């Protein structure tokens, strides 16, 4: 299982890919706004605590998302580490 950040037009998305699978699941994200950075971590159901607006830096927002370990929603695999290499945006 791989977890990594991918660039987007206005921020980055946290992506999960299971081994041998080409399907990518978005499990979190960060976007830049006029007021700072907005961050969210995916959840099943309603949990407003997994989103925050107006964070001061991209790194702070990414740490917020990763603190929820949203990949646990899809795997029982222990010790998953987020790849430090940020993947480029996919052009459509």
Image (cartoon, grey):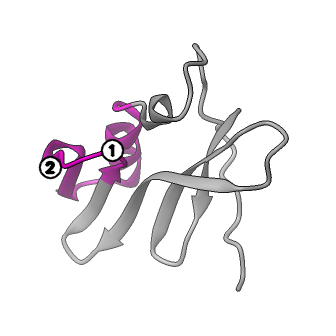
- Depth check, front residue: 32 or 44: 44
Query: Where 11 sits versus 57, above or below?
Result: below
Q: Secondary structure at mark 2?
A: helix
In the image, residue 88 lies at what x, y percent?
70, 65
Q: Is residue 13 magenta?
A: no
Residue at the extreme top of the image, as rendered: 78
Where on the picture, by quarter, is residue 47?
Answer: top left
In the image, residue 82 lies at what x, y percent?
59, 33
Q: Which residue is mark 1?
A: 43
In the image, residue 63 lies at what x, y percent?
38, 38
Where on the picture, by quarter, is residue 8?
Answer: bottom right
Mark 2 burial class by Cα count in 10 Å: few <14, some 14-19, many 20+: few
Mark 1 burial class by Cα count in 10 Å: few <14, some 14-19, many 20+: some
Q: Is residue 48 magenta?
A: yes
- Depth check, front residue: 6 or 26: 26
Q: Which residues are magenta?
A: 40-68
- Depth check, front residue: 66 or 33: 66
Evaluate if marks 2 and 1 touch, with contact meaning CB atoms under 8 Å apart: no
User: The C terminus appears in which quarter of the rendering?
Assistant: bottom right
Residue at the extreme bottom of the image, as rendered: 92
Q: Which mark is residue 29?
A: none
In the image, residue 36 lies at what x, y percent?
24, 65
In the figure, is residue 50 to the left or right of 6?
A: left
Disc 2 from disc 1: Cα separation: 10 Å
Where on the picture, by quarter, is residue 62?
Answer: top left
Tell me which numbered mark, 2 or 1, is placed earlier along the sequence: 1
Q: Which residue is mark 2?
A: 48
Query: Where 60 sits versus 12, above or below?
Result: above
């Amino acid at each position: 299982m791989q977890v990594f950040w991918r660039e987007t037009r206005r921020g980055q998305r946290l992506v999960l890919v299971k081994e041998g699978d080409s399907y990518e699941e978005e499990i979190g994200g960060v976007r830049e706004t006029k007021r700072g950075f907005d961050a969210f971590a995916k959840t099943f159901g309603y949990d407003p605590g997994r989103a925050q607006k107006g964070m001061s830096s991209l790194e702070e927002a990414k740490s917020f998302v990763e603190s929820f370990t949203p990949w646990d929603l899809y795997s029982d695999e222990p010790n998953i580490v987020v790849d430090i290499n940020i993947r480029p945006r996919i052009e459509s």
